[in-house]
Amino acid sequence: MEPVIRVRDLTRRFGAFTAVDRVSFNVNAGEIVGFLGPNGAGKTTTIKMILGLLRISSGSVHVKEINAERNHRDVKSMVGYMSQKFSLYPLLTVWENVTFFGGVSGLSSFRLEECRREIAARLPAGAAARRVDALPPGHRQEVALFVSLMTEPDILLLDEPTSGVDPENRRLFWDRIYDLKQAGKTILVTTHNLDEAEYADRMLILHRGRLLLDGSPGDLLREYGADSIENLFREVIVRHETH
């Protein structure tokens, strides 16, 4: 497969604290990569460096051969981003959010009207006219994903998209991710919910800023003789902490 994201020895320091420590991995075209780790592992910091939103202390990121740090505007135009906090303005209505983010992205008035109709069709009747903070988490999640897709990017970076969402809506959200893969999207999704790793083609396990594992869930379970992702994660962490 062809890598569309190449991360090499990526490091981010905040004073004496190293949040991301020499991390290297590829994300290949058309695959879903699950980026796993507990809160504070460095997942969001890594995502922000890929997007060019955070300065890189050392190492490099290339998105479709473009240096992300030097050309972050070009990268931003190719990548859809759904942040940990849903990327929405809670005091605006759904339609106002769609109009605002579409305008910032340079969408035409015709395309914006299409987007308004599309999001209204995805939500219960009348929900698009409501303020975002009045919507259930699952509907906010749907709107945030929709907004990240309005520019029709080939690559999606989803940062903790299922945080705070009930199991049923988590499952439905992953159905949407599969649909996006079938449509040709490449998706990197961060999560601290270990059971979600089984939905991914490949998983990366990050702990205290270090990348500990990279491989398909099935291959890694067999390699470590683990009977679940949770037990695999625990064993890898214990090994890391005792070496």
Image (cartoon, rainbow, N blue to C red):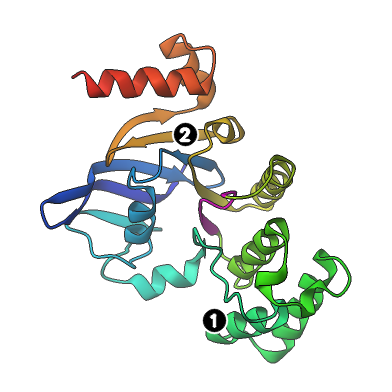
Label placed on residue 71: none
Circle 2 packing at 10 Å, graded few (<14), some (14-19), many (20+), is many
Viewed as shown, does residue 49 lie left or right of 37?
Answer: left
Where residue 178 appears, x then y in whole percent? 68, 44
Where residue 161 appears, x then y in whole percent? 57, 53
Q: Is residue 29 magenta?
A: no
For residue 161, above or below residue 122: above
Q: Name the residue under label 2.
A: 203
Residue depicted at x 41% and y 39%? 38
Q: What stretch is highlighted in magenta?
A: 155-163
- How many numbered discs, if any? 2
Q: Mark 1 points at which residue?
A: 105
Residue depicted at x 67% and y 52%? 180
Q: Residue at the top extreme?
A: 225
Q: What residue type is labelled 2?
A: Met
Sequence-first tag of 2 and 1: 1
Viewed as shown, does residue 11 lie left or right of 53?
Answer: left
For residue 136, above or below residue 128: above
Based on the displayed image, in which of its 4 quarters is residue 132 positioned?
bottom right
Based on the displayed image, in which of its 4 quarters is residue 239 positioned?
top left
For residue 205, above or below residue 120: above
- Residue situated in front as seen by the camera: 149 or 144: 144
Q: Residue at the right extreme?
A: 125
Residue depicted at x 67% and y 58%? 137
